[in-house]
């Protein structure tokens, strides 16, 4: 049972937490801003340097991509609940719930969840509903960076396990 729980915990973390981390990081790049979407490179000009007609420039705002990233953020966040559930079940099974690294990891996981649910997701929704200035997207980008940093610390705790009873 330990191997199954550990496998679920690790695979869910890779797929769901990793997916939400990527989606939250990419969202600000594609979210619409007030003033519209810039024209695509190559729309009227002949292709040059490998750019095909109608191709979008790498930095162009794309509300459809932003909406997809917003849905990924929501869906993967909901599915990501699997990670702490499997982790807690595994810690209980192994008798490790009282260890400091488990407690710190659980607190950081809760903080990441609150950050995602209370700040990142609502700001993404608002950015899609009513495009604002790029400053709001910079704040959203910073929050995504903090979210990813929290998860990086959790991963380090899972590997190093400071204070673990071996």
Image (cartoon, rainbow, N blue to C red):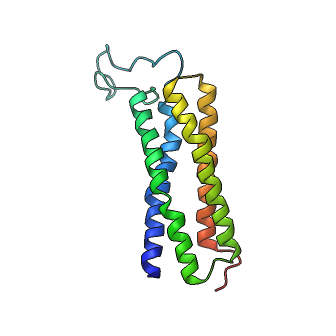
76 vs 158: above or below? above
What x and y, as percent, mark residue 26?
Answer: 49, 39
Q: Which of 118 and 39 is in front in this view?
A: 118
| Quarter of the figure with residue 154 | bottom right
Quadrant of the image for the N terminus? bottom left
> Residue 86's x, y, as percent?
50, 70
Percent position of residue 74, x then y: 47, 45
Q: Which residue reaches farthest bottom? A: 166
**Residue at x 57%, y 79% (from the top left corner):** 92
Q: Is residue 75 above or below residue 86?
A: above
Relative to 39, residue 142 above or below: below
Please report the residue visible at 43 percent of the width from the left and 48 percent of the height from the top: 75
Total labels: the figure holds: 0
Residue at 69 percent of width and 74 percent of height: 162
Identify the image quadrant of the C terminus.
Answer: bottom right
Q: Residue at x 56, y 83 (%)?
A: 94
Question: Residue 103 appears in which quarter of the rendering?
Answer: bottom right
The x and y percentages for residue 108 are 65, 59
Q: In this picture, is 161 found above or below 83?
A: below
């Amino acid at each position: 049972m330990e191997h199954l729980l550990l496998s679920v915990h690790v695979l869910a973390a890779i797929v769901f937490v990793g997916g939400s981390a990527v989606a939250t990081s990419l969202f600000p790049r594609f979210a619409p801003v007030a003033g519209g979407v810039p024209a695509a490179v190559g729309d009227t000009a002949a292709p040059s340097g490998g750019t095909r007609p109608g191709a979008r420039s790498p930095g162009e705002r794309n509300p459809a991509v932003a909406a997809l990233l917003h849905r990924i953020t929501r869906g993967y966040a909901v599915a990501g609940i699997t990670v702490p559930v499997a982790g807690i079940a595994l810690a209980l099974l192994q008798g490790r719930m009282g260890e400091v690294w488990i407690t710190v990891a659980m607190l950081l996981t809760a903080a990441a969840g609150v950050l995602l649910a209370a700040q990142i997701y609502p700001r993404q929704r608002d950015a899609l509903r009513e495009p604002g200035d790029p400053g709001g997207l910079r704040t959203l980008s910073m929050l995504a960076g903090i979210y990813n940093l929290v998860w990086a610390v959790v991963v380090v705790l899972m590997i190093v396990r400071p204070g673990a009873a071996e």
